Image (cartoon, rainbow, N blue to C red):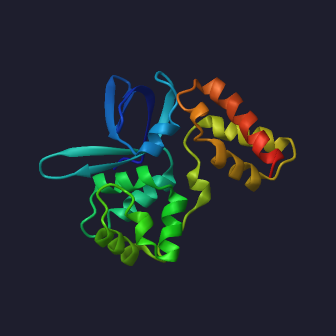
Amino acid sequence: MFHSITGTLSGKTSDTVYLSTGGIEWELSVSLQTLQSLPSLGQEIRLFCWLHHTEDQMRLYGFSTSLEKKIFLELIKVDGLGPRVALKVLSTLTPQQIQAALEVGDPQALSKAPGVGLKTAQKILLTLRGKLVLDETAAQPADRSWNDVIISLVDMGFDRKLVEEAIRAVAHEDELVNKPLEEKEKLLFKKALLWLSTH
């Protein structure tokens, strides 16, 4: 029903984001990772989303990347693991850490998420092991600053895959959180260039 919403970031709390679009303000539940990737209030952003509809309520969940949304949708297939707990898993572990835990069969890593005990972690392993294949291109947030920086670095002669790896490595550093888009773009470029020069 909903794939994504593009609008102005009008507010945020520790687990909720508000997006304004033409007279409507949307409330979306988000993971900590999505929250930390957002720019400052007043900036335009796009969030991938999923609507949870039950008999007594509707709740919209938002994700900074299509990869995060994909993992969320896989997690809620696990018996007894609802959307709220799935979001806690995504707040605690990166997609790569989740995949690594599945590959080696590590329930302890998965149980680090609040609300996920060893029994639930074992269920996640049984349900998703060997089935979760990450598309790294989907890990790119819907933030045009990423594309602009990638293009600039590729134009300088760097390999695109290495550039994308550099962007993923530095994009969530504290200095980049809550920066205006133009400032964030410049800082992201500098940090990615430094990363590339040392790898």
Residue 191 image-quadrant placement: top right
Of residues 44 and 15, the one drawn nearer to the viewer in this rendering? 15
Q: Is residue 85 left or right of residue 74?
A: left
Q: x, y (%) of residue 138? A: 56, 54
> Image height check: is 159 above or below 183?
below
Which residue: 26% across, 51% down?
52
Q: Is residue 152 left or right of residue 157?
A: left
> Image height check: is 63 above or below 134?
above
Q: x, y (%) of residue 64? A: 48, 44
Which residue: 17% across, 45% down?
57
Residue 78 in view, yes or no: no
Residue 172 in view, yes or no: yes
Q: x, y (%) of residue 102? A: 47, 72
Of residues 65 and 175, the one drawn nearer to the viewer in this rendering? 175
Q: Is residue 57 left or right of residue 176?
A: left
Which residue: 78% across, 38% down?
152
> Image height check: is 20 above or below 86?
above
Q: Residue furthest right?
A: 157
Q: x, y (%) of residue 50? A: 35, 50
Q: Residue furthest left?
A: 56
Residue 174 image-quadrant placement: top right
Of residues 19 and 190, the one drawn nearer to the viewer in this rendering? 190
Which residue: 55% across, 44% down?
141
How many marks the image carries: the answer is: 0
